[in-house]
Image (cartoon, rainbow, N blue to C red):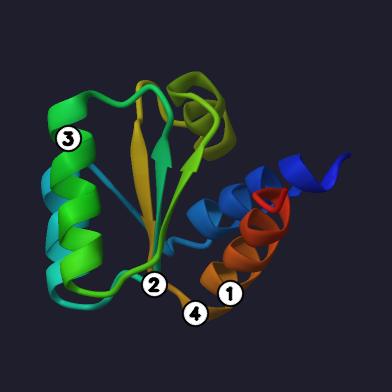
Amino acid sequence: MSDSKKYLNILGLATRAGKCTFGEEQIIKEIQSKRSKVVLIANDIGDQTKKKLTDKCSYYHIPYYFIDDRDTLSQAIGKIGRVAVSVNEHGFAKKLIELLSNNNRG
C-alpha cells in the first residue's frame, strides 16, 4: 500500500477506537471545544460546508487536510455519505498529519 493511502488505515483504526466525530455540527463543536486534533475533509464537499469547516479550523488553529472523495472517506470509516471527520486523539492525529504532510509535498 502506498504512503498516500496508509492514512485510510489509520483513520479506520481511529474510528473503531471511538476517537472520531462525524457530522458537520458535531465536528464544529469538537473544533470549538479544542477536542479536535485534526479535521479531514473530502475533496468533493459542498462549498458552504467547506468554508464553514475550514474557517472554524483556521480560527481555532486546528489543522485540516483535504483528502480523496466522500466515497473513499466513507469506506475507510465504514459509514455512508460522510464528507468530513474530526480525529480527537493526539496519537492518531499526529500520525495522520505526518502521512498527509508527506503526501502533499511536491
Q: Position of residue 94 (x, y in %)?
A: 58, 74
Asked if residue 48 lies left or right of residue 101, the reply is left
- Residues at circles 4 and 2 in contact by the CB criterion of under 8 Å: yes
**Local secondary structure at mark 3:** helix
What amino acid type should be assigned to the residue bearing mark 2? Lys
Q: Which mark is residue 90?
A: 4
- Residues at circles 2 and 1 in contact by the CB criterion of under 8 Å: yes
Q: Earlier in the sequence, mark 3 or mark 4?
A: 3
Q: Position of residue 20 (x, y in %)?
A: 39, 57
**Local secondary structure at mark 4:** helix
What amino acid type should be assigned to the residue bearing mark 1? Lys
Quote the CA–CA distance across marks 3 and 4: 25 Å
Q: Earlier in the sequence, mark 2 or mark 3?
A: 2
What amino acid type should be assigned to the residue bearing mark 4? His
State the residue at coordinates (12%, 62%): 29
**Local secondary structure at mark 2:** loop
Q: Position of residue 99 (x, y in %)?
A: 69, 59
Crowdedness near tag 4: few (<14), some (14–19) or many (≥20) residues, C-alpha within 10 Å:
some
Tell me the residue that label 2 is attached to: 37
What amino acid type should be assigned to the residue bearing mark 3? Thr
State the residue at coordinates (43%, 64%): 19
**Local secondary structure at mark 1:** helix
Tell me the residue that label 1 is attached to: 94
- Residues at circles 1 and 4 in contact by the CB criterion of under 8 Å: yes
Quote the CA–CA distance across marks 1 and 4: 6 Å
